[in-house]
Image: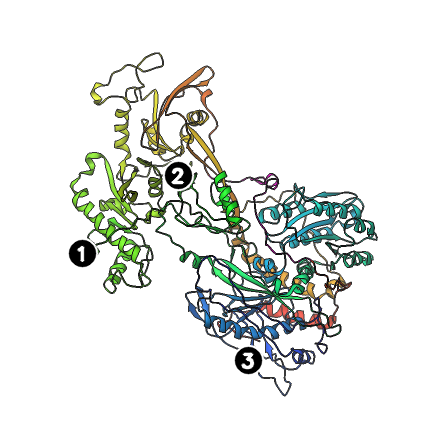
Amino acid sequence: PSSCVDGPRLGGLVWSARLWQMSLPLGWHVPWSSLHSLSQLHLEQPPCPLLAIVLKSASLSATGCCSALRPASQLCVLFSSQDDPEGEEIEREKSNSLKLEFTEDVNFKTKVNYSYAAVQIPTDIYKGSTVILNELNWTEALEDVFIENRKEDPSLLWQVFGSATGVTRYYPATPWRAPNKIDLYDVRRRPWYIQGASSPKDMVIIVDVSGSVSGLTLKLMKTSVCEMLDTLSDDDYVNVASFNEKAKPVSCFKHLVQANIRNKKVFKEDVQEMVAKGTTDYKAGFEYAFDQLQNSNITRANCNKMIMMFTDGGEDRVQDVFERYNWPNKTVRVFTFSVGQHNYDVTPLQWMACANKGYYFEIPSIGAIRINTQEYLDVLGRPMVLAGNKAKQVQWTNVYQDALGLGLMVTGTLPVFNLTEDGSSNRKNQLILGVMGIDVALNDIKKLTPRYNLGANGYIFAIDLNGYVLLHPNLQPQIINFREPVTLDFLDAELEDENKEEIRRSMIDGSEGQRVIKTLIKSLDEVRTWQGPCKDGEGNAYILGDKDGTQWESETIDSNFFLLPNAKSFHPNPREYCKDLDLSDNNTEFLENFIALMEKVTPDSKQCDNFLLHNLILDTGITQQLVERVWKDQDLNTYSLLAVFAATDGGITRVFPNKAADDWEEDPEPFNASFYRRSLDNKGYIFKPPYRDPSYRGLELENNTIGILVSTAVELSIGGRTLKPAVVGVKLDLEAWAEKFKVLASNRTDRDQLGTHRCDPATSCEMDCEANNKDLICVLIDDGGFLVLSNQEDHWYQVGKFFSEVDANLMSALYNNSFFARKESYNFQSVCTPEAQSNTGAAPRGVFVPTMADFLNLAWWTSAAACLLSLVTEDVTADSMESRETSCIMKQTQYYFSTVNATYNSIIDCGNCSRLFHAQRLANTNLLFVVADKPMCSQCESTKLPQAEIRAPPRDPNQCELVDKPRYRKGPHICFDYDAAEDTSDCGRGASFKPSLSVLLALQLLLLYLTATRQPLSSASCL
């Protein structure tokens, strides 16, 4: 090592590593559990000959890069070649290019090459630096390890090494998915790298906002703080404050808060409101920061503690503050950042960092922000490296989106350390080399969990120590955001209540148990809510929902059940009954595929799910007999029915007649159909009108009318257990049943007996909805507050609307008299169209003029090239950017029946005129019968109750209130924040590396030329 050339990274050159075997502590069996990942890799020879060759501009033995400035279809793969004895130039694409062939792989859902690993290098890193070339050389040995791992376990997905220098080596090779514009991917900012590279952090960021930092310097500080926040994970806690003569928090957070997505968003928004004024007082800033870190009455990480100060410079060293708060133990690290172009003496800032086990950085321009706001992780990694094998523990990440297209996944991570000794002092190296990761797709885990034997309302979920769901049917992020983890709390995925809070706490604590609870359940259409039981799970900890998986003794089934006489009325759900079954959304096509497969294999074949298949065959026969023996003998018009149907546990939905099957709009998978799931959880008959949003104005006719579903569960008692193998129902003709409803609500059986008398509060007769339909409103409202039937013809086109849209005054009275209760919730996974921002009164954009220091700064040149490319493509993508959807929070309000008495009479006081109404729950249904006077004056008008999903206003839900009552969580059980052997002498550099200006100009002009003339390539190549 002493003969190697030192690079500009902390701790010198990197050339050797040992990667330890990973153990996967999972609670279920997975096919990749036999993984022997990256075990005992030794690199016996340091890559010093490589560096010598580079410095002499001679041949290179290992080359390659995947730069985002290259076309997305071009792949650069690391490969080895013989050293060129003639020392000829290797920068010749034709002689050293490697063209790869990719084959489609079902596991990776993309084209891959299993013979090579690929490399990605961030846009803002100069790929020709000695550090990067050295990194490419020593990590090349990983390729053989990756290949051997796959041989031992072919089910492995991405194997990735993320280097502390920013290099990513992943296997198998696949073309990098670069975006249309600048690729900002940097492995060091990926959720899995952040969580694996250091122990949890308590961080206080203090920003100098004195008058001297106004203008460009303040803008650099704001950007730097936002970039710093992006280096924090959900295991970390943070607060941000500004200071001049006094210190104050930039947001409403008065203490350290969890560095989750929502809290970081609040910080980023409020940081932009900082204004520079006053004079600098470092003492005020540091005292505030130390007080924050010493507050023990709040939830926090309780591991690494640090203060990050951004300033333009100053002379005060505030030694008395450090003596009082931090010395002699120095439990708090101090990192100082000199921001902007200035002539201040930086010695005090360097001293603060060095005297408190921290590091000093300089951010002279925008190009230096990203690299300098993340290198502090190297310092935090020192105790972890020195801890050795104790720190070699697998950490599992939050759920996040795979950058290469595999969807949602979790990653098992393991830190990689430099185990060499410093040649000059024989001291143990304390540099973290990077993080190794093995990916596990959530879809693969779902395949190992039971789905159809838990009942339609049963499901399995899993959460991590933060309470975030790893598995949950409601985990469905709509926006792909590679920079942030997918963090959905269990209580946000459900409708929160005390029972679920206790379940969540017990799971985080690792407790086992069973529990029966009553809870609110949101319907699949998210517009209704009902109360349902959560039954215990026969030995499985905390399985919510039914465990009534129906099992039938199947007999020999005649093959004519597979004929298709009524294909239109037969809707089998395209479940994965057999591995070779071709799924299709087209019902007839799926049936044909299914029959073709059954002619080749038997239901007991190993490639088929025998449980699903036998249930399907049995349900097919039973429902066919239902059609032949019952439905065909009935005249549906006699009962004013549009259709009859049956949906079974085996996945069959059969609709009669065929015309009704053509118009069937419900989900063909019974387990995903709202009527099916609600019928299982409720006794009696469930009425379901077609949902209409408030903007609906027309009348969509179905056989000249609207259909209303009425369904109920079939109950069987077998062996003392009650089973519900199917749901049956009818579809009512709205117009015909509206006439029947008038008669039924008139308390008469013959319409010819109608009288002309009027019912009112002074008489003893009941309100007559037929005789007095001009004066009375008679309606049926379901348990979600939606109109089902009405005696008013002008209401018919409003059937299916929330009743407050029909009669706001009457619905408010029902709500105020406790017939209905409501539950507000938030959907944190929604997408919205970006809100238009007005440019009225906007000031002109600030223009950054580079100084001579920028021209001499390598990072600035790379950043400038990236920005130039962004400007070139900005006009082309402007139109698409305007319509691009963005993530947002939607507020939802659902209504449900409260526990009020079944019958109620009241008067709605409207001043000079009032309304009498009568409301009564109908037994064995989900209906409320309401009779009321028509409103006679405008005084009875009232505000509509909110029901439609709306975009949540800014700061709703109020994060400032939520952080004062943080949800229960546990951080990682290990912490590495101190080691007596830590060498803190390397604590910052005072000036940036300044290479030759002429060389830089030549290199950057070449880079810009290649960028401007880039053309997509059809095959992978490597320079």
Q: Classify mark 3: residues with Cα within 10 Å, few (<14), some (14-19) or many (20+).
A: few
Write down the region rendered in magenta.
Answer: 949-977
The answer to the question of whether label 1 and label 3 lie on touching residues, with beta carbons closer than 8 A, is: no
Question: Residue at coordinates 48% horizontally, 75% vertically from top-left?
Answer: 115
Q: Residues within 10 Å of mark 2 (few under 14, many from 20)?
A: some
> What main secondary structure does the magenta stretch of the protein show?
loop
Q: Nearer the viewer, residue 887 or 981?
A: 981
Question: x and y percent of residue 799 in the render?
Answer: 35, 34
Helix, strand or loop at mark 1? loop
Q: Which residue is mark 2?
A: 532
Mark 3 highlights which residue? 94
Left or right: 775 in relation to 395: left
302, 898: nearer the viewer: 302
Q: CA distance from mark 1 to mark 3?
A: 67 Å
Mark whose residue sits in front, 1 or 3: 1
Residue 776: quadrant of the picture: top left
> Mark 1 sits on what residue?
558
